[in-house]
Image (cartoon, rainbow, N blue to C red):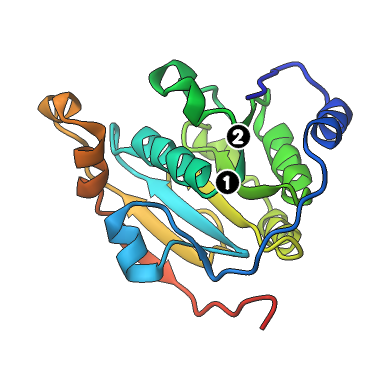
Amino acid sequence: MFSGPNTSLPALRQLLAERFPTAAHAADDALVTGIPAIDAATGGLPRPGLTEVVCSAPSCGSQLLLGQLLQATRTQNRRVALVDRNDAFDPGSWPASQLEHLVWVRPRHTEEALTAADLLARDANFGLIILDLHHAARAELRRIPSTRWYRLQRALEPALMAGLVLTPFPLVPSAHLRLELGDSHVFAAHNRPRPTLVTALKPQFLRQRAHTSATG
């Protein structure tokens, strides 16, 4: 795992080149998440493609979703980059063995987060790029031009990579799949085992576009 709020993007590029030699990914249609409601409906996250998860309620399960994706990608031997706009991820909540394949980037503002995600999406060593913006100011998010999202989508395509963006409201026009976590977990739910909570995650499907593999 790598974390650095003051690390420049050129330094990040160099770090990635040193830590991860170029790797090839097999062509799939989806990245299996281990979340039954998603995998049963779509097979997983489209790849290459952007998935947007709208976190419209507090305590809606976004961190549970992130943790499950880390576990699933670890099992599949895929590296993950998490661009964490508001430093919301808590690595202490997860076993260290589940974070060994993670690059954790903590940008200072939304523009830097978008630039970092675009850079990471062009590195073929990753199987999943996660951009967490759901705690960012709404006014800041509304200023993002739609072209930035289409550019990010295009960056994912050569490496057949999955991209996930967490937002507080529907924001990503280029998303192949848009889900919403709109229900807050009751306090008592936090005492349940994580596998039980993962099984109970039932996001609402807001958009699902037909997806054609880049190799097809």
Q: Which residue is mark 2?
A: 101
In the displayed structure, 182 sits above or below 38; it is: above
Looking at the rendered structure, the secondary structure element under dot 1 is loop
Question: For the residue carrying disc 2, how many other residues have a C-alpha within 10 Å: few (<14), some (14-19), or many (20+)?
Answer: some
Q: Residue 89, position in %: x, y? A: 48, 25
Pointer 1 residue: 77
As drawn, the label of residue 55 is none
For badge 1, the amino acid type reads: Asn
Quarter of the image where one finds residue 183: top left
Residue 211 position, x and y percent, is: 54, 77
CB of mark 2 within 8 Å of CB of mark 1?
Answer: yes
Which quarter of the figure has residue 119?
top right
Q: Earlier in the sequence, mark 2 or mark 1?
A: 1
On screen, residue 62 above or below 11: below
Q: CA distance from mark 2 to mark 1?
A: 8 Å
Q: Where is residue 215 drawn, in percent x and y?
A: 69, 78
